[in-house]
Amino acid sequence: MKNRTLLVILLLFLSLLSVLFLYHFRVEADPRTHQPIHAASFSHDLFDQVLQEHVDAEGQVNYTKLKANPEKLEKYLDLLAVAKPTELSYNAQLAFWVNAYNALVIKGAVDNYPTTSVRKIKWFGGFFYRLKFQVAGKTYTLNQIEHDIIRTEFVDPRIHFILVCASSSCPPIENSAFSAEDIEERLETATFNFIQEPENIRLDRAKRRVYLSKIFKWYETDFYEGYDGVADFLADYLPAEAADLLLAENVKFHYLDYDWTLNDQH
């Protein structure tokens, strides 16, 4: 009798664990159903307003204020859900998907706020590959937007400096939306600014070491697009002396710890 009771307790415990497991690992979708919006009438103005009202000069987001007033963000996401980006120009499509990614990252953080990190939302990286959103009439995870669309269809290593994962070691989110007219200039500026920051790139000439953001490790293959790898890419954005060190044969590369702390003003 005692053994049977223990068995029942064990089964109940395992059932509870399975429920908790499924809760944390379930795929969550953000359903939206509206009429399609054609390219001529699509606008990023609402997202631009969201960024101007909630992002400061350092790229920190006021999630508390945004969670209390999400109407503009939600209306923008309604537009994204039914837009037809294939009708847009190349630069407009790139701006569309970058804005979509950044807006959906904010949406995911807001929905689960308060939190101190996106890594705590859906355990084991689930924030990026289990939360699902509607964009352009289809359902995507953040990873699918980044890897299957942006990295695949717009092959440009500079995109990693305007895609923002809501974390301290990410590039800072800018307080205005991207557009077809300004995305090329802002890609170049964001890349230059990221590389100039000692938190992202640091050279130790005495030890002949280069310390890099893990972005350059995770996406190493992307930096062979038009370049001979990460060092060759970075050399374009650094002074000649630093570039020479980067390209030297006996230099060692080390990757900095990535800070996943939420880019929260509070």
Image (spheres, rainbow, N blue to C red):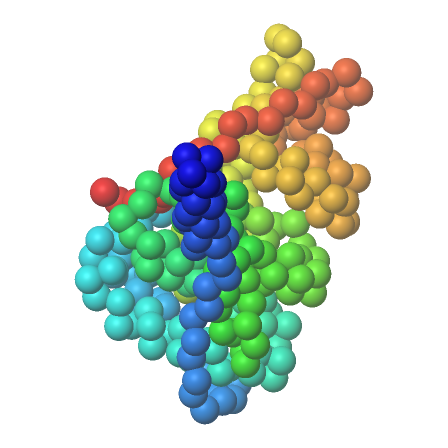
Q: Position of residue 196 (x, y in %)?
A: 51, 34
* Residue 102: quarter of image: bottom left
Q: Position of residue 164 (x, y in %)?
A: 47, 51
Q: Nearer the viewer, residue 249 or 163?
A: 163
210 displayed left or right of 182: right
Residue drawn 61% across and 84% down? 87
From this viewpoint, which residue is outermost toward the front? 1
From this viewpoint, which residue is outermost toward the bottom? 35
197 displayed left or right of 66: right
Q: Nearer the viewer, residue 10 or 126?
A: 10
Q: Position of residue 74 (x, y in %)?
A: 33, 72
Residue drawn 27% across and 48% down? 114
Number of marks in the rendered image? 0
Q: Position of residue 181 (x, y in %)?
A: 51, 69
Q: On the rendered image, what quadrant is the C terminus found in? A: top left
Residue drawn 67% across and 23% down? 253
Where 169 falls versus 184 (above or below)?
above
Q: On the rendered image, what quadrant is the N terminus found in? A: top left
Residue 197 visible in the picture: no
Where 130 falls versus 224 (above or below)?
below
Residue drawn 45% across and 50% down? 15
Residue 73 visible in the picture: yes
Q: Nearer the viewer, residue 191 or 99?
A: 99
